Image (spheres, helix red, strand yellow):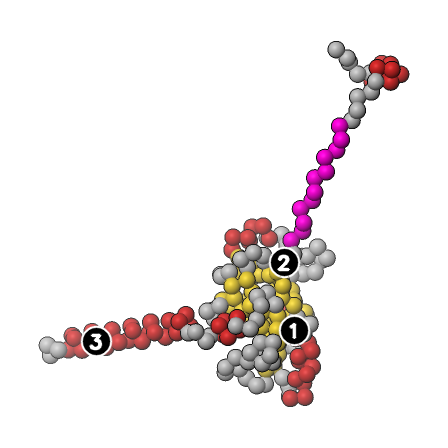
Amino acid sequence: MERLPWALAGIAAAGIIHILTVFAIPVLAERDAWGRLSAVMTPNTLAIADGKSAPRLPFTSPGVETAYCLFDLSKDNVIVKSPLPEAAWSLALSTRSGENFYLITGADAKKPRVRLLIIPQDRLSGEASTEKTGEGDEQAIIVSPSQTGIVAIRAPLRGESFRAQAQEELRKAHCEGQKRPEPLAVVAMPDAAEPSEEEDRAQPLSRRRRRP
C-alpha cells in the first residue's frame, strides 16, 4: 500500500508526457506539410500538387486533386481567388503548424467562384471597409492568427476521367500579394507672378492690389 501513491504518480506523469509529446509532434516534425511544400514552392504563389510544381503530401487521397499556396503576410495582405464549381470542392486555410482557421465548400459558397482577402490582426482596422473591391467584386476578409500559413484547394474526383478537368479548373485559381496603390505625387504649383503697376492700374478699383 505504501507504493500505491508512487505508482499512481508514475502513471500520471507518463500520461502527461504522452500528451505533451503528441501536441509537440506537429511543431517538431521536420517533414510536415509546411516543410515539404516550402522546399519547392515560392510564397504567395499557387501550385497544383502534381509531384512537380508541388509535392503530393502523405495520406492524401488519390481521388482528390489539390492546389496549395504558402501565404506570407509579413509585407502585404494576400488575395486568394478560387473556383468552387461543385458542392464537394473546398478551400481551407491553416497555420504553418496545421491549425485550420477557415473552411468553405462549394455548397457553402453557393456561387462558382470566391475571393478571399487574408490579413493579419494588426491590419484589420484598415481593411474593415473593403468587403467589396474597387471593381465591385465581393470578397471575404479573413483574419489570420499567424503571419504564414497554407491555402489548400481540394477537388474530389467523380472518377479518373475527371482528373484533367479538375486540374484545369484548379489552374484558374490565384494566390498573390495585394498590390497597394502608388502614393500620389505632389506637384508644386508655381507662384503666380504679381501684375506690373501698369497692369494693376488697368484693373477695376475693387481688384487692384494694395501696394506699400
Q: Which residue is at the front of the view, 32 or 20?
A: 32
Q: Which residue is tagged 3?
A: 10
Residue at (82% x, 16% y) in the render: 208
* Front disc: 3 or 2: 2
Q: Which residue is tagged 2?
A: 178
Give SS at disc 1: loop
The part of the image, by quadrant, that contains residue 133 is bottom right
Image location of residue 170, percent across then percent down:
66, 75
Spatial distance from mark 3 to mark 2, Cα to Cα? 54 Å
Give SS at disc 3: helix
Q: Which residue is tagged 1?
A: 84
Spatial distance from mark 1 to mark 3, Cα to Cα? 52 Å
Q: State yes or no: residue 5 in magenta.
A: no
| Rendered-image quadrant of the N terminus | bottom left
Sort mark 1 into few (<14), some (14-19) or many (20+) by Cα contacts within 10 Å.
Answer: many
Q: Which residue is at the front of the view, 196 or 168?
A: 196
Which span of residues is magenta-colored?
180-191
Q: State yes or no: residue 186 in magenta.
A: yes
Q: Amino acid at mark 1?
A: Leu
Spatial distance from mark 1 to mark 2, Cα to Cα? 21 Å
Residue at (51% x, 63% y) in the render: 148
Q: Which residue is at the front of the view, 185 or 8?
A: 185
The part of the image, by quadrant, that contains residue 157 is bottom right
* Front disc: 1 or 2: 2
Residue located farthest toward the bottom when viewing the structure as drawn? 160
Residue 96 higher or lower than 121, as above or below: below
Q: Earlier in the sequence, mark 1 or mark 3?
A: 3
Sort mark 3 into few (<14), some (14-19) or many (20+) by Cα contacts within 10 Å.
Answer: few
Image location of residue 200, percent across then percent down:
85, 16
Residue 203 higher or lower than 64, as above or below: above
Sort mark 2 into few (<14), some (14-19) or many (20+) by Cα contacts within 10 Å.
Answer: some
Residue 20 appears left or right of 155 = left
